[in-house]
Image (spheres, helix red, strand yellow):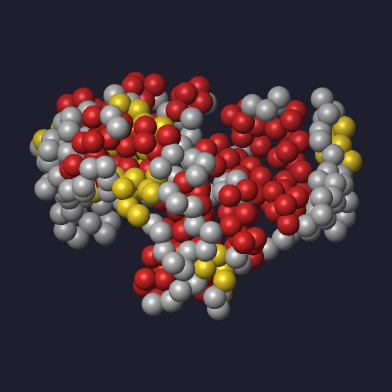
């Protein structure tokens, strides 16, 4: 293992090599494999070993980090491990989801406010930067931040100073920023939703998160890990059915580790002894009706479900735009994040239709 991976294991106080045995008599057909562990991150695949190595290298520094990966891959877990392995691990770790805060409130969330600075400000409130002083601030979905706020964030990163809303004097802080996005940063910059100067300031050390479908043997290992944890919590001895084991390894898991963990939990609740993972992944959906399409239009029949019509319009527009997702999102008037979420849903639905029920026609591709 690399020095970075060694550092990852040593800092969290685990024996070298940091391998956690997962064999359990109740885990039928469980492969004789072991997971590496880095904080609350688990993996045995090459992409995860590389990730652990990168974490081990950057954590002891004060460099800003930009984590890029799909939703559900564990970006906040990586940020937390980086903090745990840093020199400032005893200082605060503060997390903020930039996509969950309205543009009108995010400045107060980041920088705080003085008493009476606006309606409802009945007392002075410290913001995330001030609360994270000396430690780490994790900014999730940073590309969802407005361009005006990106300018203010850039100034703080450059000067380590900011004004609370309504304050006359600046506040100085020393904070390491770890940011994350589920968008391709280059596409976000090209689409004008991420300032290039902020991107370069955040991405001193970029880290790419592998999707679960790219992690090979980790999928089955993680499923057994989640099942073992549930069995320990409930004092049970439930197992996966053989069909479930095959489906777990074949399904593309567009929601990544989060989707896998939730599916195992749902199947566990429903099972008396053997887990059936198929219903937990999601109910089978009827095949959308075939629609008429030509070079520049899509026609759907009356009675077609709204969700099916939306799917046909999105897929046809994507095809018309030559597969360019950024352009497709602009044409449809939706965010790139929304488009990615919809495409992940369609990928999951198509897989279930093909894998669990006899294959049927899935509609007509748009023609240019």
Q: Position of residue 134 (x, y in %)?
A: 12, 41
Residue 82: image x %, image y %? Answer: 25, 40
User: In the figure, 22 relative to 333: above or below?
Assistant: below
In which quadrant is the C terminus drawn? top right
Give the vertical position of 50 relative to 165 (above or below): above
Position of residue 102 in the picture relative to residue 204 (left or right): right
**Total of numbered circles in the picture?**
0
Residue name at image x 39 percent, y 21 percent: 196
Q: Quadrant of the N terminus?
A: top left
Q: State the residue in front, 32 or 110.
A: 32
Q: Position of residue 41 (x, y in %)?
A: 34, 47
- Using residue 63 as the reference point, say whether residue 73 is left or right of it: right
Residue 112 visible in rendering? no
Up/down of 323 relative to 354, above or below: above
The residue shown at (29%, 24%) is 204
The part of the image, by quadrant, that contains residue 338 is: top right
Which residue is rendered at x = 62% and y = 48% of the image? 250
Q: Residue 58: which quarter of the image?
A: top left
Horizontal side of residue 48 vs 247, given as left or right: left
Q: Horizontal and vertical percent for residue 138?
A: 29, 42
Choose between 18 and 94: the one closer to the eye. Answer: 18
x 66%, y 45%: residue = 347
Residue 237 in view in this figure: yes
The answer to whether residue 170 is above or below residue 38 is above
């Amino acid at each position: 293992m690399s020095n970075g991976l060694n550092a990852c294991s040593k800092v969290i106080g685990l024996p070298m090599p940091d391998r956690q045995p997962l064999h359990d008599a109740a885990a039928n057909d469980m492969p004789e494999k072991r997971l590496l562990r880095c904080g609350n991150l688990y993996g045995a695949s090459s992409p995860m070993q590389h990730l652990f190595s990168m974490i081990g290298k950057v954590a002891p520094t004060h460099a800003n980090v930009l984590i890029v990966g799909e939703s559900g891959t564990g970006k906040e877990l990586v940020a937390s491990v980086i903090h745990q392995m840093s020199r400032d691990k005893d200082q605060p770790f503060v997390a903020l989801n930039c996509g969950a805060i309205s543009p009108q409130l995010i400045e107060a969330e980041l920088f705080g406010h003085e008493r009476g600075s606006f309606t409802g400000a009945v007392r002075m409130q410290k913001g995330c930067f001030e609360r994270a002083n000396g430690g780490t601030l994790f900014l999730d979905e940073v590309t969802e931040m407005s361009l005006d706020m990106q300018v203010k964030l850039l100034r703080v990163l450059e000067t380590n100073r900011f004004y609370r809303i309504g304050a006359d004097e600046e506040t100085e802080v020393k904070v390491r920023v770890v940011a994350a996005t589920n968008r391709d940063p280059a596409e976000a910059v090209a689409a004008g939703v991420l300032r290039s100067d902020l991107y370069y300031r955040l991405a001193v050390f970029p880290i790419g998160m592998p999707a679960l479908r790219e992690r090979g043997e980790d999928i089955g290992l993680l499923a057994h890990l989640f099942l073992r944890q549930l069995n320990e919590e409930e004092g049970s001895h439930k197992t996966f059915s053989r069909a479930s084991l095959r489906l777990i390894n074949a399904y593309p898991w567009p929601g990544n580790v989060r989707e896998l963990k939730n599916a195992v939990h749902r199947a566990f609740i429903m099972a008396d002894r053997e887990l059936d993972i198929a219903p937990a992944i999601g109910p089978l959906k009827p095949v959308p009706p075939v629609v008429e399409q030509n070079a520049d239009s899509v026609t759907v029949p009356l009675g077609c479900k709204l969700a099916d019509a939306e799917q046909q319009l999105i897929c046809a527009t994507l095809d018309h735009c030559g597969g360019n997702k950024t352009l497709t999102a602009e044409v449809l008037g939706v965010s790139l994040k929304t488009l990615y979420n919809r495409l992940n849903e369609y990928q999951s639905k198509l897989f279930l239709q093909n894998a669990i029920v006899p294959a049927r026609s899935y509609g007509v591709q748009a023609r240019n």
